[in-house]
Image (cartoon, grey):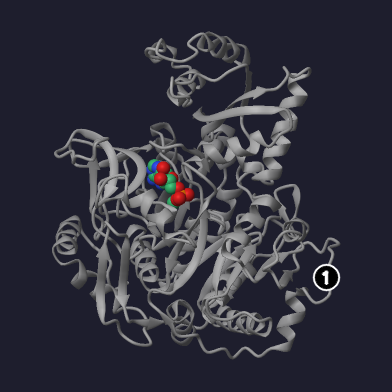
């Protein structure tokens, strides 16, 4: 942990250095990793014609920093501790040596099945150790992984596979989450009816439910590993070669494939892991995210493993067998650092404190929060009931596109404040701008959050469409990376993220584009048009509210709503199902025919006092109908 900041004074001086000499600052940190060849230039960048290159000319394989060096120096230290969905099933510990061997062996399986440098591999798996092994094996052979979260539908998998032309899918027979059995291979099979690029499917056994296995295409993980050795030298990669693609939703269109590269991402995810959580060797670290999201990539797999940490993987859900499961796991494994999402905190808070009774949480030293704004009530409960006023809370703000944490307290060093992400990490230069892009200076202000200088974990491109990357992130405010978030900077210079200012909804910490949900609803038979907005939801943070126009008024409203939910689940996945559906005969439109989303949001949020002037609408009379329908829903 060479680069851990140890005091607030040191934070300020390190931060200063990172702004004055970013190249010197990051070069020093990067030298703590395994490189096959050192870089020629630290940074090359242009935000106007978007291009960023970190550690240009450097050669490496990220798995040598994550595995080889630790397997050599501390072979018997646990790398991954896995806790099953079923509390009675034995947990599994993989030491660095064992993990290294399993990754090497599976790397050879990938090669044997035709996968090499630059090939794309789709991974659709539950939270089992094989998932981490699959990611690392792709990285070892230089293949680009594209993990798709288990809550997405066959259609969403197919879209993602086709966008990046994956050659292979790695999956399992099935999955068990809480009391639910979830088909995995079957969903992949449905997806593959329209994915000509996929030549091979590797199926790991988890539930051993019956699955179809197509000759020549589908092979079993357990069978394949018997026929290869565990000797697999790591492929030499350029620092700027893609490491992975992760699809994420934006304001418009289909999800974008965010591309992260080998060198910068490694340095950034690891540096931020070690600093934010103040990880100490031997600590047990538990991040509850799913590896299907960026948090799992950066803070279950790459950051912790490159740090030689003990990282936990949990297969289940926080409420199975009951709402005390997280606390049982912390007690059982003597967890020191616990990193979760506000939606989980709010939900568990709602079950009542009896689930905490008899649970020994005294091993905890540091708490973290990620994915959405954490409200004060949840922050206070987390601080009191879980941290016992003894554990700093790192409210970490970042995004799929940033690769790692950007604004966050450094545990035990930065003074925290409920619901504030506090201060930028070294190397991160935030700036607030107004809608015209003018910088908002000083403290006690609000604005659109942008970043004005590159950091090593920044998105490099959106797969197959660099212009889209430029247009989405670097064109709205000239010369700046735009986050899509609104932000307050208070009198102390502390940052508080106030939520998305674009058409992205954050549901239980999952990013969902309103346009995507609208497209799915519009595919439902009889639907003419729809408009989707977010509204405050006690547990999920935001809920999805859909206004739907049908050709004919539905004869049975309840069943029609259920049908629409099924269509959305089929097209995107259960996570995108609207929480509220209101059938309407029209949508408020401007004279140029654009939907007035502001009005829709105000009605959905019950903010009728601030509806504003609607007389300029093309159809002002529709507003009364919207309000009346909304009141009936309540
Ligand atoms: C939101 C998740 C407030 C934000 C790592 C961002 C947050 C989006 C926080 C990215 C936080 C994430 N406080 N809001 N601590 N962390 N967000 O790409 O709106 O899934 O833009 O990355 O989540 O979501 P993503």
Q: Is residue 380 visible?
A: yes
Q: What x and y, as percent, mark residue 240?
A: 38, 73
In percent of width and height, residue 560 lies at 75, 25
Q: Which corner quadrant of the image does residue 21 belong to?
A: bottom left
Where does the C terminus fall, quadrant-wise?
top right
Residue 216 position by quadrant: bottom right
Q: Residue at x 50, y 67 (%)?
A: 244
**Please, is residue 453 above or below residue 357 in the view?**
below
Image height check: is 628 above or below 255?
above
> Considering depth in this image, is 187 or 103 the residue closer to the camera?
187
Residue drawn at point x = 23 percent, y = 75 percent: 28
Split into 4 quadrants, where in the image is the N terminus? bottom left
Side of 219 relative to 39 (left or right): right
Residue 480 lies left or right of residue 367; in this view the side is left
- Judging from the image, what secondary structure is the residue with disc 1 in? loop
Please state which of residues 509 and 187 is positioned toward the viewer in this rendering: 187
Crowding at mark 1 (Cα within 10 Å: few <14, some 14-19, many 20+)? few
Read off the residue under disc 1.
Answer: 214
Q: Is residue 388 visible?
A: no
Give residue 457's position: percent from left, percent from top: 36, 63
Q: Nearer the viewer, residue 38 or 217?
A: 217
């Amino acid at each position: 942990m060479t680069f851990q900041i140890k005091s607030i004074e040191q934070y300020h001086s390190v931060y200063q250095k990172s702004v004055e000499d970013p190249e010197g600052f990051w070069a020093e940190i990067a030298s703590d990793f395994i490189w096959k060849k050192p870089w020629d230039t630290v940074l090359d960048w242009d935000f106007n014609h978007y291009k960023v290159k970190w550690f240009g000319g450097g050669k490496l394989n990220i798995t040598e920093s994550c595995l080889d060096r630790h397997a050599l120096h501390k072979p018997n230290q646990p790398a991954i501790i896995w806790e099953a969905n079923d509390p009675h099933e034995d947990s599994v510990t993989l030491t660095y040596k064992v993990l290294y061997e399993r990754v090497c062996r599976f790397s050879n399986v990938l090669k044997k099945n035709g996968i090499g440098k630059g090939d794309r591999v789709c991974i659709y798996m539950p939270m089992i150790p094989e998932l981490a092994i699959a990611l690392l094996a792709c990285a070892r052979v230089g293949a680009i992984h594209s993990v798709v979260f288990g809550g997405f539908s066959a259609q969403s998998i197919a879209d993602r596979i086709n966008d990046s032309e994956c050659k292979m899918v790695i999956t399992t027979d099935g999955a068990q989450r809480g009391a639910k059995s979830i088909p995995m291979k079957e969903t992949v099979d449905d997806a593959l009816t329209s994915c000509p690029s996929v030549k091979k499917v590797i199926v790991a056994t988890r539930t051993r439910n019956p699955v179809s296995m197509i000759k020549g295409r589908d092979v079993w993980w357990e069978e394949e590993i018997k026929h290869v050795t565990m000797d697999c030298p790591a492929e030499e990669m350029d620092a700027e070669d893609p490491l992975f693609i992760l699809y994420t939703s934006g304001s418009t269109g289909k999800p974008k494939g965010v591309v992260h590269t080998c060198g910068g991402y490694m340095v950034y995810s690891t540096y931020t892991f070690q600093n934010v959580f103040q990880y100490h060797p031997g600590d047990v670290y538990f991040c509850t995210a799913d590896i299907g999201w960026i948090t799992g990539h950066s803070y279950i797999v790459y950051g912790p493993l490159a740090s030689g940490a003990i990282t936990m993987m949990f297969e289940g859900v926080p409420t199975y067998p009951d709402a005390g499961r997280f606390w049982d796991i912390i007690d059982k494994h003597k967890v020191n650092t616990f990193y979760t999402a506000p939606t989980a905190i709010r939900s568990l808070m709602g079950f009542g404190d009896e689930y905490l009774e008899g649970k020994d949480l005294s091993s905890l030293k540091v708490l973290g929060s990620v994915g959405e704004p954490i409200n004060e009530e949840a922050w206070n409960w987390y601080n009191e009931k879980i941290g016992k006023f003894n554990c700093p809370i790192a409210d970490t703000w970042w995004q799929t596109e940033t690769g790692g944490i950007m604004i966050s307290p450094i545990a035990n060093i930065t003074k925290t404040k409920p619901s504030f992400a506090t201060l930028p990490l070294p190397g991160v230069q935030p700036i607030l701008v107004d809608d015209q892009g003018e910088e908002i200076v000083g403290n006690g202000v609000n604005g659109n959050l942008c970043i004005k200088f590159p950091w090593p974990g920044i998105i490099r491109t959106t797969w197959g469409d660099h212009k889209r990357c430029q247009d989405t992130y670097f064109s709205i405010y000239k010369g700046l990376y735009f986050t899509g978030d609104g932000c307050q900077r208070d009198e102390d210079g502390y940052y508080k993220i106030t939520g998305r200012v674009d058409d992205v909804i954050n549901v239980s910490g999952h990013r969902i584009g309103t346009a995507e949900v609208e497209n799915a609803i519009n595919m439902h038979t009889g639907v003419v048009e729809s408009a989707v907005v977010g509204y405050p939801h006690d547990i999920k943070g935001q809920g999805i509210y859909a206004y739907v126009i049908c050709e004919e008024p539905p004869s049975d409203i309840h069943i029609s709503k259920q049908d629409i939910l099924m269509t959305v689940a089929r097209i995107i996945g259960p996570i995108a199902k609207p929480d509220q559906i209101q059938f309407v005969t029209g949508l408020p439109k401007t004279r140029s025919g654009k939907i007035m989303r502001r009005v829709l949001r105000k009605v959905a949020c019950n903010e009728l006092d601030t509806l504003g002037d609607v007389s300029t609408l093309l159809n002002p009379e529709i507003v009364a109908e919207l309000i009346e329908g909304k009141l009936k829903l309540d």
